[in-house]
């Protein structure tokens, strides 16, 4: 990881999903002056390049049948004419944004030798620059991106694998498609993946998703460095917004980036049989090369519950009133009215006098005007310490046991964990596999795995600590962290070996 001068830029937290760029007054003034000149010019030129790419990208598959579109474009004018143009314009976008030079270390191997390029750490939407340096390999993208102007055309040009993460069938189909491409012996071009699956602040590497390793083929790890005095590029779920990151990056005279190709890794037979073993191998190299720790983070996004509590307190609600509001909310969830509510319903449920506060809370959990009350109730209760962990888990299980048969489906587990954390969780396959070793997952199975499995012990330690109590750092063993062991209001307490146990309070 790039060394940062403490007076120039610091991270607000070692949590991988939080990054806040802090500038000195001199840096702020300099950024405003240069930004007012450079940002409009650079953004205009970048947008101009995108607009030029739009119709050219559409030509790639224009006039082809569905069968022809399902095969890679390997020859003809669609390849030798259009591919270099798109690659040139893509590089021009980043050149105009200030990425004048890209230092390349090592050598990229061909697609037959390594069908997959695994890039980490993933710290910004600007990481897409690596595509231009790797000759535009195919990627995996959310199906929702198809509807975005220009981006949708570029995904079509790239013949990307599209997946609807909310649809289990779409995810299964994507896995089949990825395996088919990676085992095509060079028929399909290389694939580039960011195995972390989301952006982090670069202070630690989160657990890799298995997608890049499912086919058991050789993988070439690729390191992405931003060796700059001021780290403006990173963008995470919380802290500096993407607009601020883009502004600060474009306000610099230039931004350095290094792409480093590491030796190809060929998985062993054991790793081919169990792709989950493979997530560790690039991490070891990244740790050695970058000097940053790895972590077992498995949940995506930053919990909005603490911010929700802060907004409630700012609106004048005391602890007792917050507890009463949560009680009204769970009653609503279990009533015939259901668990969906709009902003106008949310305000009286929470006892808020300011509708704008209700709108802000709704925005933390949803992209539209409707919100899942179960998410607010469970996530806020989890950090407030109003219920013991076992009681909270029982409530969550009851709310998501849709068939009322005492067990959960894979979708139920994904939704339940998303509600507890407060943000959607699309990669819970590993958890569901662990839960279903003895059959359909029951409440006892869920409690057992979350309180005994090392990875999910860390999850409990991090996400279910009451507000105001510092949680154990995610990359540290629980036995090193004593925070909360002497608190009687925690939703759990720790045993002598550091394992979280249910508190007797409220259980």
Image (spheres, grey):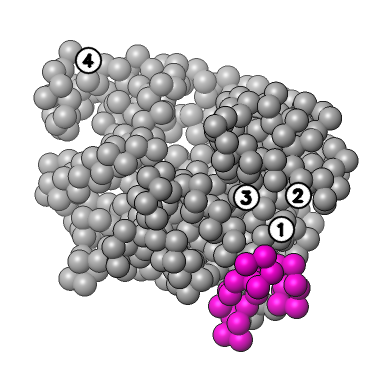
- The earlier-in-sequence mark between 4 and 3 is 4
Residue 323, numbered circle: 2
Q: List the residue tagged with mark 1.
A: 386
> Real-space Cα distance between discs 1 and 3?
11 Å
- The residues bearing labels 2 and 3 have C-alpha atoms spaced at a distance of 13 Å
The residue sitting at 12% across, 24% down in the picture is 68
Q: Which one is closest to the eye, mark 1 or mark 4?
A: 1
* Residue at the far bottom in the pictured view: 496
Residue 167, how many percent across, how many down? 34, 37
Left or right of 276 on screen, residue 105: right
- Mark 2 is surrounded, within 10 Å at the Cα level, by few (under 14), some (14 to 19) or many (20 or more) other residues, namely some
SS majority, magenta: loop
Mark linked to residue 379: 3
- Name the secondary structure under disc 1: loop
Frontmost residue, 83 versus 354: 354
Question: Which x, y percent locates residue 308?
Answer: 72, 43
């Amino acid at each position: 990881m790039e060394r940062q001068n403490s007076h120039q830029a610091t991270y607000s937290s070692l949590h991988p999903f939080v990054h806040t760029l802090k500038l000195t007054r001199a840096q702020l003034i300099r950024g405003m002056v240069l930004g007012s000149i450079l940002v409009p010019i650079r953004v205009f030129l970048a947008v101009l390049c995108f607009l030029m790419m739009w119709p050219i990208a559409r030509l790639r598959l224009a006039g082809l049948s569905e069968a022809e579109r399902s095969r890679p474009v390997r020859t003809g004018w669609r390849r030798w004419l259009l591919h270099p143009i798109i690659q040139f314009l893509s590089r021009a976008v980043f050149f105009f944004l200030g990425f004048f030079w890209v230092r390349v270390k090592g050598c990229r191997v061909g697609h037959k030798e390594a069908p997959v390029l695994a890039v980490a750490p993933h710290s910004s939407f600007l990481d897409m620059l690596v595509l231009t340096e790797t000759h535009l390999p195919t990627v995996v993208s959310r199906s929702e991106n198809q509807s975005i102007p220009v981006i949708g055309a570029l995904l079509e040009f790239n013949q990307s694998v599209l997946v609807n993460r909310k649809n289990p069938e779409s995810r299964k189909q994507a896995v089949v498609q990825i395996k088919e491409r990676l085992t095509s012996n060079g028929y399909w071009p290389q694939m580039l993946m960011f195995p972390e699956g989301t952006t982090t602040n670069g202070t630690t590497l989160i657990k890799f998703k298995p997608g890049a390793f499912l086919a058991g083929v050789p993988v070439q790890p690729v390191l992405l460095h931003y060796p700059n005095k001021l780290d403006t590029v990173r963008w995470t779920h919380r802290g500096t917004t993407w607009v601020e990151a883009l502004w600060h990056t474009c306000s610099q005279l230039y931004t350095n980036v290094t792409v480093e190709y590491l030796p190809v890794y060929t998985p062993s037979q054991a790793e081919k049989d169990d792709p989950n073993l493979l997530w560790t191998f690039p991490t070891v190299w990244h740790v050695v090369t970058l000097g940053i720790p790895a972590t077992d983070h498995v949940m995506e996004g930053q919990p909005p519950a603490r911010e929700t509590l802060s907004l409630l307190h700012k609106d004048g609600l005391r602890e007792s009133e917050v507890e009463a509001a949560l009680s009204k909310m769970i009653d609503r969830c279990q009533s015939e009215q259901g668990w969906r509510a709009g902003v106008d319903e949310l305000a009286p449920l929470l006892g808020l006098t300011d509708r704008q506060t209700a709108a802000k809370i709704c925005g933390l959990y949803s992209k539209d005007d409707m919100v899942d009350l179960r998410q607010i109730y469970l996530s806020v209760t989890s950090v407030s310490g109003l219920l013991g962990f076992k009681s909270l888990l029982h409530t969550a299980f009851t709310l998501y046991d849709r068939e009322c048969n005492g067990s959960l489906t894979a979708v139920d587990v994904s939704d339940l964990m998303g509600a507890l954390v407060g943000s959607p969780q699309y990669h819970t396959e590993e958890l569901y596999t662990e839960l279903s070793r003895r059959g359909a997952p029951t409440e006892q199975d869920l409690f057992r795995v979350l309180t005994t499995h090392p990875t999910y012990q860390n999850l409990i330690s991090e996400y279910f600590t009451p507000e105001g109590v510092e949680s154990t750092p995610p990359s540290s063993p629980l036995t090193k962290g004593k925070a909360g062991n002497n608190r009687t209001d925690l939703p759990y307490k720790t045993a002598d070996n550091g394992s979280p146990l249910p508190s007797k309070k409220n259980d």
